[in-house]
Amino acid sequence: MTNSLSADDRFLQLMEAIAQTRQLVEGNAEAIAAQQQAWVETSRLVESNARSIAEQREAWIETRQIIESSSRAIAANSNTVTELREELRVNITDVVSMISTMAEQAEVDRAETRATVQQILEVLTQRFTSNGH
């Protein structure tokens, strides 16, 4: 088979090889187009995920700021409660002391009243006893 093919046969073989090459190129072009489409879609998904991550980050920052603000408010309220509790303790101590003083004074007043009533009774007893007999 050394050059026994005619020019027409060689032309046909060349045309067949060109047709096969064209089919391969077209197949590769379709595969490349599909690959490019997949890359475009992947790129869109990556961009979408990046936006979503950025939004989540912003939400976390806002949440952290709210937590920090709430934490400061709780600490301030805790300090206020502690101060009010101390004031209440002092006030209760003062009231108990005042009640104790009033109870002691009431006991003194009661004793004085009892002594006064006793003196009046003695005076009246003497007066009625000496007048009557």
Image (tube, rainbow, N blue to C red):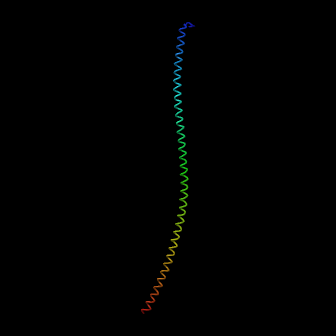
Whole-percent x, y for residue 37 in the image: 52, 28
Task: Residue at 52%, 71% (x, y): give it.
Answer: 98
Residue 107 against residue 64 in the figure, above or below: below
Count the numbered circles shown.
0
Quick one: which residue is furthest to the right in this view? 2
Whole-percent x, y for residue 16 in the image: 52, 14
Whole-percent x, y for residue 76 in the image: 55, 56
Q: Quadrant of residue 50?
A: top right
Compare residues 131 and 45 and report the one nearer the observer: 45
Quadrant showing the C terminus:
bottom left
Residue 98 against residue 28 in the figure, above or below: below
Quick one: which residue is furthest to the left in this view? 132
Residue 104 against residue 75 in the figure, above or below: below
Residue 65 against residue 1 in the figure, above or below: below
In the displayed structure image, the side of residue 125 where residue 74 appears, left or right: right
Whole-percent x, y for residue 40 in the image: 53, 30
Quadrant showing the N terminus:
top right
Compare residues 106 and 31 and report the one nearer the observer: 31
Compare residues 119 and 83 and report the one nearer the observer: 83
